[in-house]
Image (tube, helix red, strand yellow):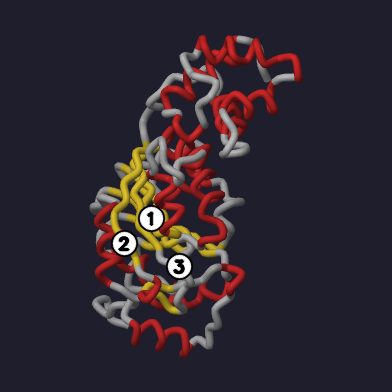
Amino acid sequence: MSRMEDISTPKRTKEIIQRHGFSFKKSLGQNFLIDQNILGKIVGAAELDETKGALEIGPGIGALTQKLAETAGKVTAVEIDQRLIPILEEVLEPYGHVRVIHGDVLKLDLREVIEREYADQTGVSVVANLPYYVTTPIIMKLLEEHLPLENIVVMIQKEVAERMAASPGGKEYGSLSIAVQYYCEPELVCTVPHTVFIPQPNVDSAVIRLKVRQEAPVEVEDEAFFFTVVQASFAQRRKTISNNLKTRFFASEGREELERLLGEAEILPSRRAETLSLEEFARLSNVLKQAGLK
């Protein structure tokens, strides 16, 4: 294979799949992208150059990996499907600065991988076409482990991307929105029709860039407790914040105490969680923490 030959064309993708006798596993959510324009937008959003590294999750047969290799100083791709490893090693052979790791990204020590693979790079971004079924666990692992990342640029289900970027007040806004926005600044890059994949998924996708914050935008006394309060507040979306928190934190006689604490946090008990901003959730969790709630 010559360096210039694109993996991502429909013809080339089908040729590689057929030559290796590869069959798609539905359980792994395998959908290979065959649109060079979308691949260009993904790589562009990651703001890479020869001094920066890219960590790819789920490279498939290497279409995105190839584009990353043409831009980044170092690329490490983590693939869970053993059957794809020899294919990747063959098609990426011209790129000496690409390394393929066989493993489950949810079980890997990513901090160790980043420290080992990118010691000579000025920054690292995660860039990936993520399987729908593990999108949220993977992204939350990347964020909760406070990894030294600049950007997380991922193609995911359109509906999930909209939830991550949602503002207070809409039906898309929820605990995922708050978690992502606590750690990152989200930006929708583009929507991706289901027709540009082999095989075609049932729903459309979107590319989202999560610019990782160097420090949280709000001050919380206890990060884990903050997220507990957020989860409890959204437990039943149609209920008021007062009713959801009462169910989680207070016995039957605790309503007056809860309403006093909500007043201290300057939040009306009749509001629903979807109307509260990140700042209001931070203030609420700090008040509840100071009151000794667990």
Residue tagged 1: 127
At label 3, the amino acid type is Val
In x, y percent, where is residue 25?
58, 75
Callout 3: helix, strand or loop? loop
Q: Quadrant of residue 16?
A: bottom left
Callout 2: helix, strand or loop? helix
Instruction: Tell me which residue sits at (59%, 34%) in the image.
Output: 239
In x, y percent, where is residue 277?
42, 28
Residue tagged 3: 203
Whether the residues at callouts 2 and 1 have beta carbons within 8 Å, the answer is yes
Residue with the most extreme front position: 270
Instruction: Tell me which residue sits at (54%, 78%) in the image.
Output: 24
On the rendered image, what quadrant is the C terminus found in? top right
Q: CA distance from mark 3 to mark 2?
A: 26 Å
Instruction: Tell me which residue sits at (36%, 30%) in the image.
Output: 214
> Can residue 148 be seen in this snapshot?
yes
